[in-house]
Image (cartoon, rainbow, N blue to C red):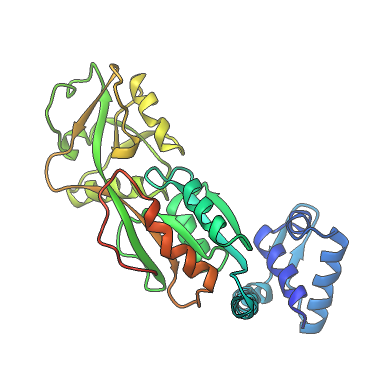
């Protein structure tokens, strides 16, 4: 069994499309198809169900995928270990991020890392499914690390290091009945139409959790993936919002920002990795400097390299 065949299989399994997998691998599609056929012949089982409309994994393919990902990761770790001894870090680190990270200066982080380790490739991807999708990608091996905002206790297989936190506040239109209040409770907002991120985003889950703890539910009338644009929808009277401080409007006469009353509610930026998977030298180096590029909010005590 060749590593190349496993790499082609993983690409098709993750893309569920032979054409996209070929593009990702920078090879012709016929080469990918031939490699998959050879692997299926060697294993004595079909790995994909194919028809004119879609590609899906068979039971055999589902069983093979995590093993193939682990094998490829181990092979890359072996290459990285040799490269480290030979001089200088090499390899690839796959990093996931939310569509808006707010308090993390990501270009500066990666610029610094590239200056120190130019032979390491950073493969950056943004998750339109929010932190929940990023955690899933870390756990199944598609990402080496991810910047996430988690609403509660992480799964045991996820290693999480908090980098910074940002308190939540309410945002209402300037003419709203609560606009003159010095502070407001979540309970006072519960019956209002809300504008928020889609399900799966950390900020959405945190507010939902806080309301549920008081036995309350809210009605989200509009879901917006880019949290920094939410105040514009509030400005035009489409609803209210509860946002972390980095997404609050500044100097907007058509909205009012009201601190939340009661125990503090905060959005926390964390970096997540797989708890059981070996971290190569490049990943360790990137984790070691990640916290240096968080600014403007409360930062936890340094926990050292992850």
Which quadrant is the C terminus positioned in? Answer: bottom left
Measured along the vertical axis of the image, is residue 155 above or below residue 111? Answer: below
Picture residue at 41% right of the left edge, 55% below the top: 148
The picture places residue 19, in percent across and down from the top left corner, at: 79, 54
Residue 297 left/right relative to 90: left
Quadrant assignment, res 224: top left
The picture places residue 206, in percent across and down from the top left corner, at: 29, 49
Picture residue at 27% right of the left edge, 29% below the top: 171
Foreground: 25 or 198? 25
In the rendered picture of this protein, how many numbered marks are placed on residues?
0
Quadrant assignment, res 290: bottom left
Picture residue at 60% right of the left edge, 56% below the top: 123
Residue 224 left/right relative to 86: left
Q: Is residue 244 visible?
A: no
Which quadrant is the N terminus positioned in? Answer: bottom right
Residue 33 left/right relative to 299: right
The picture places residue 289, in percent across and down from the top left corner, at: 42, 60
Quadrant assignment, res 61: bottom right
Q: Is residue 178 visible?
A: yes
Foreground: 156 or 211? 156
Residue 53 left/right relative to 99: right
Picture residue at 35% right of the left edge, 45% below the top: 204
The picture places residue 101, in percent across and down from the top left corner, at: 42, 46
């Amino acid at each position: 069994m060749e590593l190349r065949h496993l790499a082609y299989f993983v690409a098709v399994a993750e893309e569920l499309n032979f054409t996209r997998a070929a593009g990702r691998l920078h090879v012709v599609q016929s080469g990918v198809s031939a490699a998959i056929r050879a692997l299926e012949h060697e294993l004595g089982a079909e790995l994909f169900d194919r028809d004119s409309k879609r590609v899906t994994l068979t039971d055999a393919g589902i069983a093979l995928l995590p093993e193939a990902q682990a094998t490829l990761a181990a092979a890359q770790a072996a290459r990285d270990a040799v490269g480290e001894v030979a001089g200088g870090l090499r390899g690839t680190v796959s990093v996931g991020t939310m569509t808006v990270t707010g308090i993390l200066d990501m270009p500066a982080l990666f610029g610094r890392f590239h200056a120190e380790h130019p032979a390491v490739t950073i493969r950056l991807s943004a998750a339109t499914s929010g932190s929940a999708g990023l955690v899933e990608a870390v756990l199944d091996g598609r990402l080496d690390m991810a910047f996430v905002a988690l609403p509660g206790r992480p799964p045991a297989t996820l290693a999480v290091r908090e980098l910074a936190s940002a308190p939540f506040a309410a945002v209402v239109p300037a003419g709203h009945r609560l606009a003159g209040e010095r502070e407001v409770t979540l309970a006072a907002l519960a019956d209002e139409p809300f504008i928020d991120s889609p399900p799966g985003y950390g900020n959405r889950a945190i507010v939902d959790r806080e309301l549920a703890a008081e036995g309350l539910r809210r009605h989200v009338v509009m879901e917006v993936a880019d949290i920094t644009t939410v105040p514009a929808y509030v400005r035009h009277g489409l609803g209210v919002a509860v946002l972390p401080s980095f997404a609050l409007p500044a100097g907007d006469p058509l909205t009012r920002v009201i601190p939340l009353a009661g125990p503090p509610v905060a959005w926390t930026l964390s970096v997540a990795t797989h708890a059981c998977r070996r971290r190569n030298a490049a990943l360790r180096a990137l984790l070691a400097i990640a916290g240096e590029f968080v600014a403007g909010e409360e930062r936890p005590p340094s926990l050292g390299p992850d």
